[in-house]
């Protein structure tokens, strides 16, 4: 009997080891696939237009500084201005989206009122509506009120973010006991002070997660900016990249395009690195109910 249990235990350990090996192998393959495109972007940024047209290579070439200089000094675009415009829009959108979504989630989570379930259902229903459905009417409204070539039409709609609201609400259910809120109310704290000084610090991991997602989504947004921003000084990075790609074929330089794409990714990487510690906490803690 003892020998049988020992054999079963060894068999279970072997199976567990094999399963763990398979999981690690799959994760390694997925990691390589994810990083390969980024690696090839760096490689292509070091190649000239003629080399890029010549075919694939996995080794870097010596035209990195040439491509950087050509992209940075291109007369048709202003890369520093475009990156500043994109950063302003993306940063404002990320801050407003996370704050007001957390505030809305707090209102749904902390209060009991008659239409609470209907309001939650309504917000969830909005989440499944594609933004392109309302884009035509929104753009028409912006042109009517003279809101073109302004950043606010790109920033303020981000306040209404059902996906961020849903994530914040689920996270609050995991980490925010109502006893803390009730204690703050008994001590005379008003609701905004309670939210800003007690609730928000508890939501730091979730805020970090949603800030990076909102920042990346706004940074990469091309659809609305292309419709609302027509003046060169207001154009964002995606519009400028599309402008480079649509250049005259005789002046088209793929090395310059790859270099600009690489420069466009760097701010996103910096923001991710800054918020990376909180991102892991937010992803794990929000999925486990305490």
Image (spheres, rainbow, N blue to C red):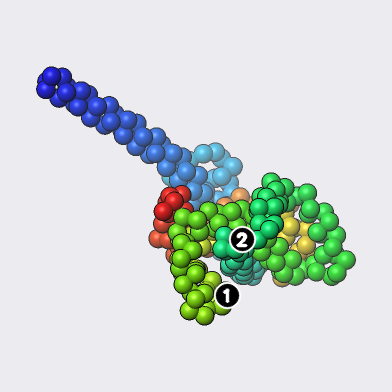
* Disc 2 secondary structure class: loop
Q: Residue at x 70, y 48 (%)?
A: 125
Nearer to me, 53 or 44: 44
Where is residue 44? Give x, y as percent.
Answer: 52, 48
Q: Which residue is mark 1?
A: 192
Residue 158 occupies which quadrant of the picture? bottom right
Q: Residue at x 70, y 66 (%)?
A: 156
Outermost bottom residue: 188
- Can you see residue 68? no
Q: Which residue is mark 2?
A: 112
Q: How many marks?
A: 2
Q: Residue at x 48, y 51 (%)?
A: 42
Is 63 positioned to the left or the right of 163 in the image? left
Q: Residue at x 74, y 57 (%)?
A: 224
Is 65 positioned to the left or the right of 124 in the image? left
Given contact means CB atoms under 8 Å apart, are the residues at marks 2 and 1 in contact?
no
Residue 278 occupies which quadrant of the picture? bottom left
Outermost left residue: 2
- Categorize mark 2 by other alpha carbons within 10 Å: few (<14), some (14-19), many (20+): few
Where is residue 219? Give x, y as percent.
Answer: 61, 60
* Quarter in which the N terminus is drawn: top left
Label number found at residue 7: none
Q: CA distance from mark 2 to mark 1?
A: 17 Å
Where is residue 228? Give x, y as percent.
Answer: 78, 62
Is 203 positioned to the left or the right of 72 in the image? left
């Amino acid at each position: 009997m003892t020998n049988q249990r020992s054999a079963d235990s060894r068999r279970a350990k072997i199976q567990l080891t094999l399963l763990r090996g398979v999981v690690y192998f799959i994760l390694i393959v997925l990691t390589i696939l994810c990083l390969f495109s980024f690696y090839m972007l760096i490689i292509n940024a070091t190649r000239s237009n003629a080399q890029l047209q010549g075919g694939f290579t996995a080794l870097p070439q010596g035209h990195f500084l040439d491509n950087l200089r050509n992209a940075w000094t291109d007369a048709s675009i202003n890369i520093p201005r475009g990156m500043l415009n994109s950063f302003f829009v993306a940063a404002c959108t990320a801050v407003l989206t996370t704050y007001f979504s957390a505030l809305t989630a707090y209102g749904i989570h902390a209060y009991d009122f008659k239409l609470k379930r209907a309001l939650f259902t309504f917000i969830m229903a909005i989440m499944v509506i594609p933004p392109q459905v309302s884009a035509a009417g929104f753009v028409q409204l912006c042109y009517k009120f003279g809101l073109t070539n302004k950043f606010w039409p790109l920033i303020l709609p981000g306040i209404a973010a059902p996906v961020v609201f849903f994530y914040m609400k689920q996270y609050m259910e995991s980490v925010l006991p109502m006893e803390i809120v009730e204690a703050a109310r008994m001590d005379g704290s008003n609701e905004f002070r309670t939210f800003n000084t007690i609730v928000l610090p508890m939501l730091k991991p979730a805020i970090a997660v949603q800030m990076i997602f909102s920042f990346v989504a706004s940074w990469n947004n091309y659809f609305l900016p292309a419709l609302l921003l027509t003046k060169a000084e207001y154009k964002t990075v995606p519009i400028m990249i599309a402008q480079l790609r649509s250049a005259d074929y005789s002046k088209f330089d793929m090395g310059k395009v790859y270099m600009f794409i690489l420069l466009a990714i760097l701010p996103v990487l910096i923001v991710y690195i800054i918020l990376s510690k909180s991102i892991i906490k937010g992803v794990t803690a929000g999925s486990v109910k305490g």
